[in-house]
């Protein structure tokens, strides 16, 4: 795209700069309005400055992505209240053989869970429980918090539903769920293993000992106590790290009340059996949702159908559950879509890419290296989702001149590098910030994971894991 008029380029750049500043520094002193309001402000500026028309602004909002995000939050809330994450916590602690064994479990369980339940969700639910496990065994909290945050980011790269930027890539690239999964899975598994080994090497002495002295049932009690004190886990924690607890309490699958004759046949039983039925139903329909993704059904409507099935079968007022949806996140995405679309209309991103494109071809080692460095830096400067929105189309267009296979690989490379780039610094991803905030505010065993504590491990881990994973991207073809 050719450059627009000078006034449009300048004004569009100003509007985008406002978005970038408030996305990276949501509490900046001269405009402490937060990320969500910052995204809306930038979108409004794009229209006021006539960078984008109102009709084009509405058209740029990607409704399928918003629908998938909404439904994923609802499903995740029902799964949380069905005990899914309590079981994950029990798996972490079961017959643990010491600190090193526990660290490996945190890495593996978190990575695999994040691929299906999003990295933000896993970090919100597991942070305080990991702190409890470490304290119970007289182990330092830092290696386990680093393991949780870094493994959540790495694991989430494997699927379109693992994190928000992958959702954008999956919809824009039209890559089927199985092809996306198999294209990145080898890199994710290798990256998870390398990240785990690096943590063990760096904290080997600190992890000596650590055999649990308490009975096994204490772990379940700890997880229940942690869940009771936390807000619902959802991708919305990206915007709600500082939000108060939501007023609705737990979703209805775990609520208790007398069963009356007005309820359907499956509720004409004891409350204990009803809970078991609803928990089982939540697990079954979630497995069905994943299977539907694998066979290529529409991801957005599949997730929405799963969410509404859980609401209907629960047969209670769904407001407490819907209250836990992060509508703030949906508004943030809407504003971001408009802002990025307006910035693209200035022609500036295209001009910058045209300068870099000859050095960033995906059919050469040098080109892939340059492209990866650009993605890594932009993901930490402008955040990974805006980076994907800005670069995705340009990278795919350049790859289309090579071959159709190169287009798919370019999208998968973008997903891998932009996600792992989140491990570079504490500000690189929402998952990092969630772990940091949850640990600092924990009612017991609180720990302050500082920027420098994180970056000492984050920089070498990001560079090595990214480099090891790149050659493995797209090696398995469906």
Image (cartoon, rainbow, N blue to C red):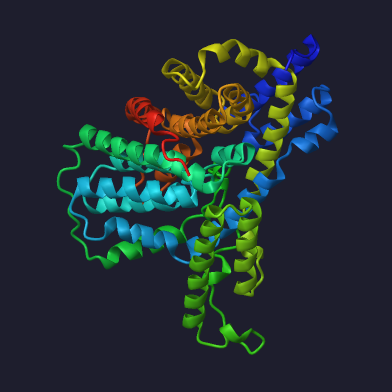
The residue nearer to you, when weighing 382 against 403, is: 403
Based on the displayed image, in which of its 4 quarters is residue 87 positioned? bottom left
The residue nearer to you, when weighing 295 against 459, is: 295
Q: Residue at x 62, y 88 (%)?
A: 260
Q: Position of residue 345 (x, y in %)?
A: 75, 22
Image quarter of the N terminus: top right
Left or right, residue 369 beside residue 217? right
Q: Is residue 162 visible?
A: no
Q: Position of residue 422 (x, y in %)?
A: 46, 32
Q: Position of residue 285 (x, y in %)?
A: 54, 66
Q: Residue at x 73, y 39 (%)?
A: 61
> Eyeballing the image, is 245 above or below 214?
above
> Eyeballing the image, is 163 above or below 339?
below
Q: Residue at x 52, y 30 (%)?
A: 414
Left or right, residue 222 beside residue 340? left
Tag count: 0
Q: Position of residue 189 (x, y in %)?
A: 35, 41
Q: Residue at x 19, y 42 (%)?
A: 207
> Eyeballing the image, is 13 above or below 59?
above
Left or right, residue 83 beside residue 133? right
Q: Is residue 130 visible?
A: yes
Residue placed furthest toward the front = 403
């Amino acid at each position: 795209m050719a450059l627009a008029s000078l006034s449009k380029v300048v004004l569009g750049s100003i509007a985008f700069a406002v978005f970038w500043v408030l996305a990276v520094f949501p509490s900046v002193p001269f405009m402490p309005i937060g990320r969500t309001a910052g995204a809306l402000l930038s979108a409004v500026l794009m229209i006021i400055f006539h960078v984008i028309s109102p009709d084009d602004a509405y058209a740029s909002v990607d409704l399928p992505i918003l629908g998938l995000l909404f439904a994923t939050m609802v499903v995740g809330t029902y799964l949380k209240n069905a005990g899914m994450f309590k079981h994950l916590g029990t798996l972490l602690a079961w017959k643990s053989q010491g600190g090193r064994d526990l660290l490996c479990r945190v890495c593996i369980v978190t990575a695999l869970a994040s691929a299906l339940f999003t990295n933000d969700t896993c970090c919100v639910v597991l942070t305080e429980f990991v702190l409890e496990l470490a304290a119970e065994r007289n182990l330092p909290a830092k290696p386990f918090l680093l393991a949780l945050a870094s493994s959540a980011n790495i694991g989430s790269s494997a699927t379109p539903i693992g994190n928000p930027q992958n959702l954008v890539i999956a919809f824009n690239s039209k890559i089927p769920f199985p092809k996306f999964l198999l294209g990145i899975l080898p890199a994710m598994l290798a990256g998870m293993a390398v990240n785990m080994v690096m943590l063990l090497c760096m904290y080997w002495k600190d992890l000596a000992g650590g055999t649990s002295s308490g009975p096994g049932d204490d772990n379940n009690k700890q997880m229940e106590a942690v869940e009771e004190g936390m807000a619902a886990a959802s991708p919305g924690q990206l915007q709600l790290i500082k939000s108060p607890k939501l007023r609705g309490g737990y979703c209805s699958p775990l609520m208790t009340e007398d069963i009356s004759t007005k309820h359907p046949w499956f509720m004409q039983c004891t409350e204990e059996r009803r809970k078991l039925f609803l928990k089982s139903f939540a697990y079954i329909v979630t497995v069905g949702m994943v299977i539907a993704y694998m066979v290529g059904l529409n991801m957005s409507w599949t997730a929405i159908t799963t969410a509404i099935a859980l609401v209907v079968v629960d047969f209670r007022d769904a407001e407490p559950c819907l209250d836990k949806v992060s509508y703030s996140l949906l508004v943030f995405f809407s504003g971001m879509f408009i802002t990025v679309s307006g910035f693209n209309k200035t022609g500036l991103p295209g001009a910058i890419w045209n300068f870099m494109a000859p050095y960033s071809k995906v059919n050469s080692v040098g080109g892939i290296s340059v492209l990866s460095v650009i993605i890594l830096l932009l993901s930490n400067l402008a955040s990974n989702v805006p980076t994907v929105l800005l670069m995705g189309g340009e990278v795919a267009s350049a790859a289309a001149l090579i071959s159709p296979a190169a287009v798919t690989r370019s999208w998968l490379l973008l997903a891998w590098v932009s996600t792992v780039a989140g491990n570079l610094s504490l500000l690189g991803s929402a998952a990092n910030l969630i772990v940091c905030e949850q640990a600092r505010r924990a009612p017991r065993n609180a720990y302050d994971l500082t920027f420098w504590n994180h970056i000492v491990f984050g920089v070498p881990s990001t560079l090595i894991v990214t480099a090891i994973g790149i050659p493995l991207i797209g090696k398995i073809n469906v």
